[in-house]
Image: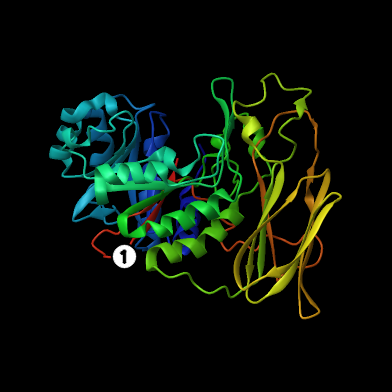
Amino acid sequence: YSHTQDLWESDISSIQSMGIDAIALDMGSDDWQPDQVASAYAAASALGTDMKLFISLDFSSVSCDTTTAISLVSDYLSNSNQFMVDNQPMISSYSGECLGGDGWQTIKDSTGGYIMPFISGIEGEFDSWTALDSWLCWGCAFPQGDYSANTDSDEYYIEQLGTKYATTVGPWMFTHYSYKNFYHRGDDFLLNLRWEQLFGMRDNLTFVEMLTWNDYGESSYMGPLNGNQPTDTTWATDYSHTDWADMSKHYITAFKTGTYPSVDTDVIYYWARPHSKSAIATEDSLPSPTDGDWAVDYMWAAIFATADASVTLTIGDSTQTFDNVTAGVNTLRIPLATGQISVSMTRDGSTIIDKTDTNFTYTGDTTELYNFNAYVSSASSGDSSSNASSSSAVAVSATAVAVSSAAAASSSASVSISIG
């Protein structure tokens, strides 16, 4: 795994520029992972940054015993870049119910850690898991059915946990392996909508974790495609998501401060899947993903406008002009049609944005391989007229970690991101 310390430094700098407070390092059992964790901490130290890191143990891979868990985190508990909450080192996990309450208590007693795992199946039993300082709802980032994102699960857990509840936000979820092949409904502006929901709950949230910086296999990545893609993740190839990272900066600022910032640059963020949900792949050995029929065949656009404007969205022969775009953030959609994407913005008779994206073509009902990932890009007022480059300020890096809004000793909410 060739992620060098220089790449870690680039990632950390880009993540910090988003307003994120900490990076969760997802740690499994692969033999290269301890060296990568060491490289991440070394990069943070070399930068002289106040960006904090913490380990999230992946118990779907890590041996489920307290000795292993303690040994994996112990080298970093007093590191100057270790994320601390009330002077306790943060320790998180994906899964971990196998340890039981006593196992987690052993880890807490040995490390002095602030324990914030995602453990499934303990709803209604949180009071008996006394070692837990917080509990993370990993799946709450994504709709679990054929509906738009909502806060029903958050409210259910907040009622049980109060401010010990931590939750997640993510842009997309699709994976296409033989052993896991599914799609979670990412439509209806999932990332924008979820951030707006978290803003409404911010008084009840200490931590929010963003999923993810670099999970290319599950399409939730927001960092750059830098050559470390897992084998056979063809659905992520050439499908950058860095503009989602850039777009998130607006919402991270709002979540942490309690006030939405003004929009100071005109930007059109847009995304679409490459083929219709009903397409039949001609060369795929796997079937269409489970719940792929939940997808909605639309192109989505989030318009960040400095003032009232008119916006035209086009994909193939599907086109619509929206004359009622107002200052701030506007979300628009049009039906998908075979062809390329064009977007434009005009104001007071002047063209502000005009872009035709030649890097993506929607193929309708025709495809060789199933791909329910999203192609994401943007156009801004500083772009050239044809195939303008992304306006993302974080295009040089991606966050493979979950973003958590840990406030540490501060009264304001804070955000972290997880890297796998």
**Res. 11 in view:** yes
Farthest left residue in view: 109
Three-letter amino acid code at disc 1?
Answer: Ser
Residue 347 point in image, percent of width and height:
75, 77
**Res. 397 in view:** no
Query: What residue is rendered at 28% in x and 36% in y?
Result: 72
Decide: is 309 above or below 245: below
Residue 121 point in image, percent of width and height:
32, 28
Q: Residues within 10 Å of mark 1 (few under 14, many from 20)?
A: some
Indicate the secondary structure of the residue bearing disc 1: loop
- How many discs mark residues in the rendered view? 1
Residue 201 is drawn in which quadrant? Answer: bottom left
Query: What residue is rendered at 45% in x and 54% in y?
Result: 197
Query: What residue is rendered at 78% in x and 43% in y?
Result: 362
Instruction: Say which residue label 1 marks.
Output: 412
In this rendering, would 172 be left or right of 389? Answer: left
Decide: is 33 above or below 165: above
